[in-house]
Amino acid sequence: MPVINRSPDSATVGSVILLGIIGVVAAQTAIASDTEKYIQDKCAGCHALSADDFDVNDMSERLRRKGPPLYYAGDKFKKEWLQGWLQSPSRIRPGGGFPPDHTVVTDDGDVIDEKTLPEHPSVAKPKAGDVAEFLLTLHLKARPPLKTAYQPKEVSPMLGKMNFNKFKGCSACHRDEEGVGGLSGPELYSAWNRLQPEFMVSYIKNPVAWDPHSMMPNKHLQEPEIHKLVDYLKLIGEKRP
Ligand code: HEC
Ligand code: HEC
């Protein structure tokens, strides 16, 4: 009886594998373009997704957009935080957006009119993963170089706080505790959980290199001084639940 050789020849195996790869790549591309379209539709009205689109416009563009730029999201956010926050967003900037346009002047100073603050739209679970994945592919084209890599060090809570509040004046615009500190910048007690450490160092060093319309002043700090501030953000961030 003739033996029938059922094993496919290597050319067949090759083309089956190749077709398989094309299929996987095509499916991934479909997810990416589907997600990209979703983000264009649902997010781009408030968030700049490309630097070119943002740079050419003046400050009015930033004001119109309402939300912070996302074209460097891949350099900025921690993945786990981003996926979770998109599903149940909580406020990061006490004043709502940019600039804080919900401030009322009172005898006790500026307060935020919470009632007028809009809720951020949320993204349902399966989609949130794809959206986060896509946003994390966005990077700044020319990331400003740092002299030394950030290595976390211990800092005393008291000295860290004094440095943040008194010496470097960060609390004029930022909060290192819930309900305490400035209103115009993002809360920083959650910064360590939200942001990549190297991004924090780089942004504090030169905010305009990231966002030409940034309202954060360049304090002309040296990298070792910035590392100490980030050590403090780590300390207070890790203390949170
Ligand atoms: C109506 C305007 C608006 C729309 C639409 C919108 N956002 Fe936002 N987004 C904002 C504002 C304002 C903030 C700042 C909120 C805060 O700090 O509390 C923000 C914050 C964010 C942040 C945190 C950014 C940071 O630097 O802290 C992310 C991430 C984000 N939005 C993603 C998205 C995604 C993804 C979509 C689409 C599904 C979207 N947003 C739709 C206005 C919007
Ligand atoms: C005059 C107000 C002001 C001062 C003072 C200031 N910042 Fe900021 N900072 C801002 C604003 C506004 C933003 C971000 C704007 C945006 O993208 O929405 C920002 C952003 C940041 C970010 C990125 C956070 C994020 O979620 O996007 C970090 C980290 C930061 N500042 C740290 C500091 C530190 C540390 C100091 C003290 C050396 C400081 N800032 C002083 C206004 C200020």
Image (cartoon, grey):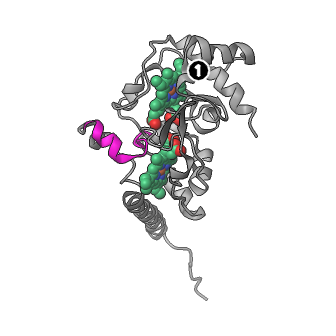
Name, please, the residue furthest toward the front.
107
- Position of 93 with respect to 52 (left or right) is right
Rendered view: 145 above or below 100: above
Asked where in the image residue 153 lies, by quadrant, the reply is: top right
Rendered view: 23 above or below 189: below
| SS at badge 1 | loop
Asked where in the image residue 45 lies, by quadrant, the reply is: bottom left
Rendered view: 62 above or below 222: below
Q: Which residue is painted at 60% across and 19% down in the image?
A: 229
**In magenta segment, residue 61:** yes
Amino acid carrying label 1: it is Tyr
Q: Which residue is the site of mark 1?
A: 150
- Position of 227 with respect to 64 (left or right) is right
Q: Give the magenta part as a residue range.
A: 58-72
Q: Looking at the picture, how far across and down is residue 136, in whole percent?
A: 49, 45
Asked where in the image residue 193 lies, by quadrant, the reply is: top right
Q: Looking at the picture, how far across and down is residue 183, in whole percent?
A: 53, 33
- Quarter of the image where the C terminus is located: top right
Q: Which residue is painted at 69% across and 32% down in the image?
A: 237
